[in-house]
Amino acid sequence: MTEQANILRIATRKSALALWQAEFVKAELERFHSDLTVELVPMSTQGDIILDTPLAKIGGKGLFVKELEQAMLDGRADIAVHSMKDVPVEFPEGLELNTICEREDPRDAFVSNKYKSLDELPQGAVVGTSSLRRQCQVRALRPDLDIRDLRGNVNTRLAKLDNGDYDAIILAAAGLLRLEMPERIADFIEPETSLPANGQGAVGIECRSDDERVKALLAPLEHTETRIRVLAERAMNRRLEGGCQVPIGAYALVNGEQVHIRGLVGAVDGSEILRDEVSGSVENAEQLGVQLAEQLLAQGADKILAEVYRDA
Ligand SMILES: NCc1[nH]cc(CCC(=O)O)c1CC(=O)O
């Protein structure tokens, strides 16, 4: 074997969470393949650079992944490690989503220095979130709250909370758990209250479609149950033609040979929320996701989403 064959390069964003996830994949790869050297190639993406505009207004899918994908296509890197939540449903020619690793806690987290839960917040309290999905669900539950946009990586968002700009913020629990800040989580928000985004809490690995060497190296990192859940959730999103910045929630659970998927599409102001669910065999996980999307469309999801895109 040549020396080069034993090196694998990971393209990654530079945020603390992205670097944690890349380091995690590096450690896993080196654990399974003792003769392999894994190197990180950190880079900035458009999503990291444009920080002053609400994500929903920048538009364009894959804001956080394009630069990483170009690096793989150019051969500057072999794989990219993503939060599945941020990965667009389609892939560029020559690249594929190869591996889905075991899921961390998929729930949203309530974070506050003053209050213990959403229920405890006083009337008019200021709540920060950048996600339309969280916004619409929190608004539906607590129309009295003052919900404001919150951008930046996990540490930036926490700094804005500590600075007193917000009474509480909502983040993915997975990010706080990975960055070893469990004490920051005042309350886990159950999926009944805030249905998570498709893929939330799962890490995915993208590589070149024709790279058999890399695919063989990645094989032991695959987690079958997480794959079934995340593919079902993504299939629902794909059928709704929703990117990651839409008021759509999708959450699947596997129980033995059965998969159960819950879906939600909401108006940003929380005035209308459509919910539905489907169950069936894990073998049909993706078709079930599509079926769930069609049930939501039949309820009028297309009209709600058309309004979201018009206002963005
Ligand atoms: N949209 C940014 C993003 N992408 C993934 C996570 C958290 C970790 C995960 O879902 O795997 C976050 C932060 C957040 O939503 O609070």
Image (cartoon, rainbow, N blue to C red):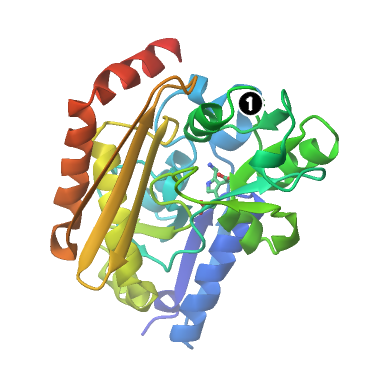
Give left or right: position of 153 versus 11: right
Q: Position of residue 167 (x, y in %)?
A: 77, 34
On the question of residue 299 being in view, the answer is yes
- The quadrant where residue 280 appears: bottom left
Give left or right: position of 260 versus 133: left
Q: Secondary structure at mark 1?
A: loop
Residue appearing at x 65%, y 52% in the figure: 187
Q: Is residue 239 above or below residue 229?
A: above
Residue appearing at x 82%, y 43% in the figure: 114
Q: Position of residue 142 (x, y in %)?
A: 59, 29
Q: Is residue 84 above or below residue 293?
A: below
The amino acid beneath tag 1 is: Asp
Q: Residue furthest right?
A: 163
- The quadrant where residue 2 appears: bottom left
Q: Position of residue 87 (x, y in %)?
A: 40, 45
- Pick whichever, 152 or 123, lies toward us: 123
- Pick whichever, 302 or 49, lies toward us: 302
Q: Is residue 144 above or below residue 212?
A: above
Give left or right: position of 274 versus 267: left
Residue appearing at x 40%, y 18% in the figure: 308
On the question of residue 18 being in view, the answer is no
Q: Which residue is mark 1?
A: 149
Give left or right: position of 146 versus 173: right
Q: Position of residue 115 (x, y in %)?
A: 77, 43
Residue appearing at x 38%, y 47% in the figure: 198
- Pick whichever, 142 or 245, lies toward us: 142
Specify the quadrant that holds the N terminus: bottom left
- Pick whichever, 131 or 136, lies toward us: 136
